[in-house]
Image (cartoon, grey):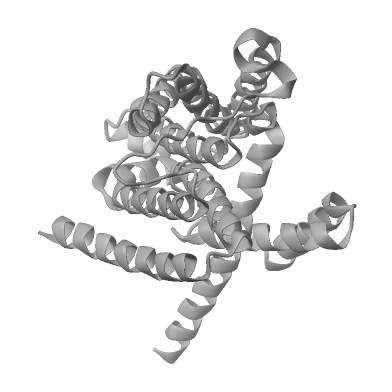
Amino acid sequence: MRTTLSWRGDMLVAALAFAALAVPAFALGMQSVLDFAVRFAIFGLLAMSLNLLIGTTGLVSFGHAAFFGSGAYAFGLLMQSGGWSVPMAILAAMAFTALLALVIGALCVRLSEIYFAFLTLAFQMLIHSIVISWVSLTGGDQGLMGGVPKPPFLGIDLGDGRHLAMFSAFCLLASVVALRQIVRSPFGAALRMLRDNPERAAFLGMSIFRYRLAAFVIAGTFAGLAGVLMSLYVSGAFPTFLYWTTSGEAIFMIMLGGITVFLGPLVGTAIFLVLNDRITNITEHHGLVMGSILLVLVLGLRKGLLDYIVDAWRERREKRA
């Protein structure tokens, strides 16, 4: 009964959030607003999926962009073949990234801490090298050129910026609801136990390997969906999607917003995108300025913004009590 109420409550909040996004998007129709909405959905979903590993499972992955880029390439290639509808290509791309995450995760999750982090990075760079080398299929360092066909389905035309923004928002909100249910489920509680005390969890008979592998596959699948949205947004796929800097940006978003609070990665994504857009308009040395600001924020707060706010609120409530 409690689980049913939780599902209904999350879906109601997601529906209200979607309506709040849809009305101004269709009313204003400003391209800059629509572009920001799509990018927020893409990178917000990427950060949320990665935080399932970092915040819930306690595994820091430096190679999460491997699934982001693989989803983008898989979807783009399927659509360019001409034999797939958009929904079926999305499902196929997610299935591909899930299988890829299963294979890579089966090797990575046996390790922990820094060894896990660098092994995921090694696999990401391996896939990046394959994409660069396989010119006949992927286009090499030029990326997947020729555009990605977007045939209408169910009255949705993803070639229209407003439709794409709303579709991206829907995918983000649906994924957030699904991830929230996963985190709040007994499976999520088991992941947190493995994060906090793996020795005790193993003593109680829990399979550390299976739980971590399941979390790795789930995170990779949602990252693949984010890659699909990116492929639709740029109408292509490029090797930079698979590069280590993409994983680094996702980690920065999580650190900015907060690791322990569920919606922290979304807050961090919004901060990161706004700062990046503003700084890029001001100076060509945006990388240096952006890195300096991020370091000041992270070192100054010593935690994510949402983590800081929630902890401060709890301390004030305890003092009043």
The answer to which image quadrant residue 18 occupies is bottom left
Instruction: Give 14 or 252, whichever is nearer the viewer.
Output: 14
Instruction: Give 279 or 115, whichever is nearer the viewer.
Output: 279
- For the point 44% across and 58% down, the residue is 262
Q: Position of residue 77 (x, y in %)?
A: 51, 20
Residue 230 in the figure: left or right of residue 90: right
Q: Position of residue 224 (x, y in %)?
A: 47, 33
The answer to which image quadrant residue 202 occupies is top left
Above or below 269: residue 96: above
Q: Position of residue 5 (x, y in %)?
A: 16, 62
- For the point 62% across and 53% down, the residue is 253
- Tell me if residue 185 can be seen: yes
- For the point 22% across and 61% down, the residue is 6
Considering every residue shown, the one lying at the far bottom of the view is 320
Residue 142 in the figure: left or right of residue 181: right
- Tell me if residue 299 can be seen: no
- For the point 61% across and 39% down, the residue is 234
